[in-house]
Image: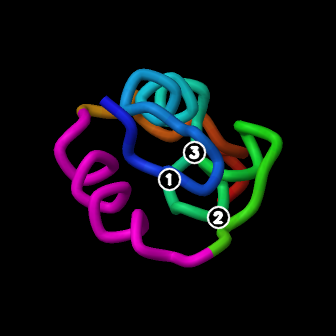
Amino acid sequence: MYVCLCNGLTDTQIRGAIDAGARRPKEVYAACNCSAQCGCCTGTMLSIIRDQPSAPFQGDARG
């Protein structure tokens, strides 16, 4: 299903970006080599981000 018509992004592409570590719409756009245009898709994109289980953060363990 197309989520972003301006950039031609599908839900599969968005989920792939999330699997690769994207946690915000800006990061999804960057992972898909595009940028926000009209912004109408960001609500749907945020819903997908919130609903998709993500791997735990593997960041720096410095305390």
Q: Could you say which disc has been placed on residue 26 in the image?
A: 2
Identify the main secondary structure in magenta: helix
Q: Name the residue beneath numbered marker 1.
A: 23
User: In terms of depth relative to the viewer, which is nearer, 21 or 56?
Assistant: 21
The number of numbered badges drawn on the structure is 3
Amino acid beneath label 3:
Ala
Q: Quadrant of the C terminus?
A: bottom right
Coloring scheme used: rainbow
Q: Position of residue 26 (x, y in %)?
A: 64, 64
Q: Position of residue 13 (x, y in %)?
A: 52, 26
User: In terms of depth relative to the viewer, which is nearer, 49 or 32?
Assistant: 32
Residue 17 sits above or below residue 6 on the image: above
Q: Name the residue beneath numbered marker 3.
A: 22
The Cα–Cα distance between marks 1 and 2, rounded to whole angstroms, is: 8 Å
- Is residue 3 magenta-colored? no
- Is residue 39 magenta-colored? yes
